[in-house]
Image (tube, rainbow, N blue to C red):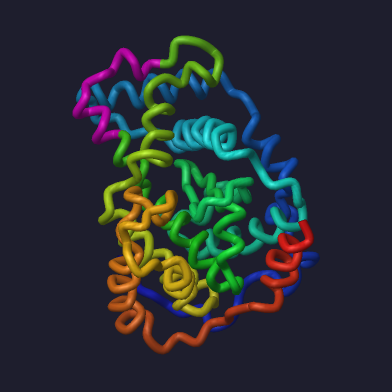
Amino acid sequence: MRKLIFAGTLLICAGVVACTSSQLATATETGMILAGKDPDKARRVGASVGQFAGGMSKEISLDDEVALGRGISLKLLEMKGGLHADNELQRYVNMVGHAVAERSDRPNLKYIFGVVNDEEVNAWAAPGGYVFITVGTLRELESEAELAGVLAHEVAHVQEGHMVRVLKKMQVQTGISDALKATDSDYEEYGQSLESGLRVLVENGLPWEMEYEADTLGSEIATLTGYKAEGLRDFLGKIETPDDDDAEGGWLSHTHPPVSKRIESLGYHLDGKLAGFDGASQEERFAKYVTNRLAKK
Ligand SMILES: [Zn+2]
């Protein structure tokens, strides 16, 4: 576990207009980046993930992780209603996401953040740095610190390579190496690795210990960025229901640990390692770029 050193100041753009161009991905730009096709990479992803199943020790390369993540992201967007059309909203979420990602342990990944047209409370991280948050989640949030907490939770999954680790384990166990090999130059032919990734994201979820880890590491990353450490916990408090069995999908379903348990677990961390940090909430800026814009629709 890395040592937590508080940056001391809110090291994100003072205003959206002051951000660098790399932080200003619009819905169109995000879509174009995601839609870029690279058949060679697709084939190599199939081959390298297939080798896991054959018991070989070869690790998936960064290029292959990114290509796999992009393929999974395209499928996910197809399933979940695509990217929200509001470019200012997408810019803002990318600004906060990139600020947080730069404080993670994998700051050199080319992170892409996207707001998805889905009313479920949910967020996803595909391998390689593709992070998505639903409109339904944004409606529940009330500050930039809470948004940063959710995005940082997803960045922590990417940082720790959670999905790649799960895929590797699944494929070694099932020994379906032939099915994993991409056979054609089309993204549709990514094969089982892509389908397995989607299933983990949408249906099965990650192992719960990875979710707890993403909560604690995510809160650390958001705090390092200069945000109030309690952002993620505050958000979880808003979506908590009296009965955890009232599952409504996404972060409230079996794909994640019960919200009450996440709050309890995070509490120990906030009262311990993260105690005493006085970060920013940025409620007004969040209202301007998210709450007010969504209300107009
Ligand atoms: Zn998670």
Q: Is residue 63 visible?
A: no
Q: Position of residue 45 (x, y in %)?
A: 43, 25
Residue 27 magenta: no
In the image, residue 77 sits, relative to residue 258, either above or below, namely above
Q: Residue at x 35, y 19 (%)?
A: 180
Where is residue 267 drawn, in percent x and y?
32, 77
Q: Residue at x 29, y 73 (%)?
A: 264
Q: Vertical placement of 90 versus 290: above or below?
A: above
Q: Which residues are magenta?
A: 168-181
Q: Quadrant of residue 268?
A: bottom left
Q: Residue at x 56, y 65 (%)?
A: 140
**Percent coordinates x, y for residue 87 in the rendering:** 76, 51
Q: In the image, is 117 to the left or to the right of 244? A: right
Quarter of the image for residue 50 reads top left
Left or right of 89 in this view: 239 = left
The percent coordinates of residue 274 (x first, y second) are 38, 80
Q: Nearer the viewer, residue 15 or 247?
A: 247
Residue at the far top in the pictured view: 183
Q: How many numbered circles does the render carry? A: 0
Q: Is residue 178 magenta?
A: yes
Quadrant of the snapshot with the C terminus: bottom right
* 238 left or right of 259 in image: right
Seen in the image, is 253 located left or right of residue 154? left
Quadrant into which the N terminus falls:
bottom left
